[in-house]
Image: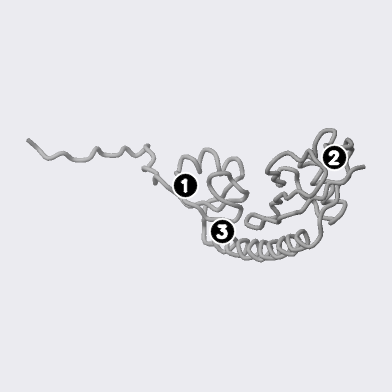
Amino acid sequence: MQPQTPPKRRPHQQPPRPDVVQVLLRRDVKGIGRRGDIVTVSSGHARNYLIPNGLAVEATDGAVEQAATLKKSRDLREAADRESARAIAAAFAESPLVITAKAGATGKLFGSVTAADIADAVQRQFHVVVERKHVTIEKPIREVGTHTVTVALFADVRGTLNVDVRQA
């Protein structure tokens, strides 16, 4: 038996492509990375999806330098945002959020105070825009009194907010 020799490549065939490539992300891509990151992905995913849709470019030397400057500016911006979120969380701890709602003689509300109501009241009282999906209410607020809710202000910064529900 003769030893097996690899098949010869014909001149018109493309050389085999690498299985993985490094790309610079131009936008945040869920499950892969954030804008400015250099990530390793399969060559097919990069060639067929990321690069044609403008989500990434091939990681060249110039792209790597650009990624470093983008990452540095993003880190500085995130640090400033994190500090302002901590200051807002401290302000939440100092003063309660006052919400007035219609209630019966026993103090039971007609309806309930929702996360959207709390987000609107935070914007009016503290001049901070909070999305309702970032407000966590342990149990529905259906009575007059003081209740505690948690507000996500940044990726790792949560503020505890005392909500004082008063009868209108």
Precedes in sequence: disc 3 or disc 2: 3
Query: Residue pushed farthest top?
Result: 111
Going 49% across and 40% down the picture, which residue do you hit? Answer: 45
Q: Which of labels 3 and 2 is toward the front?
A: 2
- x%, y% of residue 155? 64, 54
At label 1, counting other C-alpha atoms closer than 10 Å, the crowd grade (few under 14, some 14-19, many 20 or more) is: some
Marks 3/2 in contact by CB < 8 Å: the verdict is no
Q: Is residue 20 left or right of residue 104?
A: left
Q: Residue at x 7, y 35 (%)?
A: 1
**Tag 1 or tag 3, which sits nearer the N-term?**
1
Q: Identify the residue position indicated by label 3 in the image.
A: 63
In the rendered image, residue 55, in percent from the top left (x then y), is placed at 60, 45
Task: Tell whether 150 sits left or right of 69.
Answer: right
Q: On screen, 147 above or below 90?
A: above
Identity of the residue furthest to the right in this view: 168
Q: Are marks 1 and 2 in contact (CB under 8 Å)?
A: no
Foreground residue among 155 and 7: 155
Three-letter amino acid code of the residue under disc 1 = Val
**Between disc 1 and disc 2, whose residue precedes?**
1
Q: Quadrant of residue 9?
A: top left
Front residue of this view, candidates 115 and 127: 115
Q: Residue furthest left?
A: 1
Q: Is residue 141 above or below residue 162?
A: above
Q: Which residue is mark 1?
A: 41
Question: What residue would you read off at disc 2?
Answer: 107
Q: CA distance from mark 3 to mark 2?
A: 62 Å
Residue at the image position 37 percent from the left and 43 percent from the top: 15
Q: CA distance from mark 1 to mark 2?
A: 59 Å
> In which quadrant will I find the C terminus?
top right
Q: Amino acid at mark 2?
A: Gly
Q: Does dot 1 land on a helix, a strand or a loop?
A: strand
Residue 93, position in %: x, y?
75, 60
